[in-house]
Image (cartoon, grey):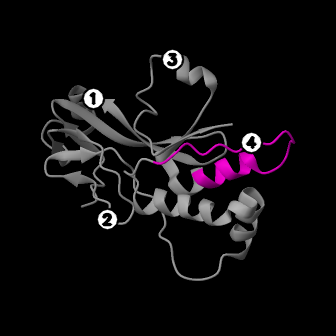
């Protein structure tokens, strides 16, 4: 059930789905708090748009059987924009062989587990090299591209902050 309505209510709070522009020219979809008064001003009190209604938020990660809502709760986990398919992937495989070297099967298993079983606790993956330009940052960007909004880049300062709601429920926290 994909709710593409522009407005929705969770509990007693109204939200609006918006597309915020980025400096890159892209857009990022966000949910922002909206007021009923602004809604009435925009549409008039007799022609309000349909509003999705939920009792609360939940976080249920799934890439294979993603659901936006579970009963009356809105899933804050985001769907990924693609699905794996059979076939060769020579460039990605070459890149992953460069990153993992003799541990390539471990790397492939790790990525597969992230996709197939996102709730499974996995060890922290740490890529270490004294050399620069070895592909560590590119690998993090690759994971971000695979898992979209369910992955976030953090700095060391982010871990010292009390404001961690933005990343606390992500599948991946990527630190360069």
Q: Residues within 10 Å of mark 3 (few under 14, many from 20)?
A: few
Mark 1 and 3 residues: CB-CB less than 8 Å, in contact? no
Percent x, y of residue 78: 39, 50
Report the side of 60 relative to 98 (left or right).
left
Q: Earlier in the sequence, mark 4 or mark 1?
A: 1
Q: Nearer the viewer, residue 23 or 2?
A: 2
Residue 43 lies in quadrant = top left
Which mark lies nearer to you, 2 or 4?
4
Residue with the mark numbered 2: 65
Q: Is residue 91 left or right of residue 52?
A: right
Q: Residue 100: x and y, percent? A: 71, 58
Residue under the image location 60 percent in, 20 percent down: 157
Please check the rendered image and state whether residue 129 is part of the magenta-colored stretch, yes or no: yes
Mark closest to the chain's N terminus, 1 or 2: 1
Question: Label 4 belongs to which residue?
Answer: 128
Element assignment for label 2: loop
- Sequence order check: which comes first, mark 3 or mark 4? 4
Nearest to the eye among marks 1 and 3: give it.
3
**Residue tagged 3:** 161
Q: Residues within 10 Å of mark 1 (few under 14, many from 20)?
A: few
Residue drawn at x 51%, y 64% is 112
Q: Is residue 67 above or below residue 130?
A: below
Q: Earlier in the sequence, mark 2 or mark 3?
A: 2
Q: Mark 1 highlights which residue?
A: 38
First in sequence: mark 1 or mark 3? 1
Q: Secondary structure at mark 4?
A: loop
């Amino acid at each position: 059930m994909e709710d593409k309505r522009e407005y929705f209510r969770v509990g007693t709070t109204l939200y609006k789905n918006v597309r915020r522009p980025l400096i890159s020219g892209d857009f990022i979809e966000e949910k922002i708090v909206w007021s009923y008064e602004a809604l009435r001003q925009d549409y008039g009190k007799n022609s309000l748009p349909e509003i999705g209604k939920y009792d609360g938020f939940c976080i249920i990660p799934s890439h294979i059987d993603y659901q936006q809502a579970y009963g009356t709760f809105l899933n804050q986990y985001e769907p990924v924009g693609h699905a794996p398919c059979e076939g060769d992937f020579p460039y990605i495989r070459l890149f992953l062989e460069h990153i993992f070297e003799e541990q390539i099967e471990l790397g492939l298993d790790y990525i597969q587990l992230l996709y197939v079983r996102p709730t499974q606790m996995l060890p922290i993956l740490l890529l270490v090299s004294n050399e620069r330009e070895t592909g560590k940052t590119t690998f993090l960007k690759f994971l971000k591209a695979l898992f979209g909004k369910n992955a976030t880049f953090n700095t060391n300062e982010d871990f010292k902050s009390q404001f961690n709601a933005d990343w606390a429920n992500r599948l991946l926290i990527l630190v360069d």
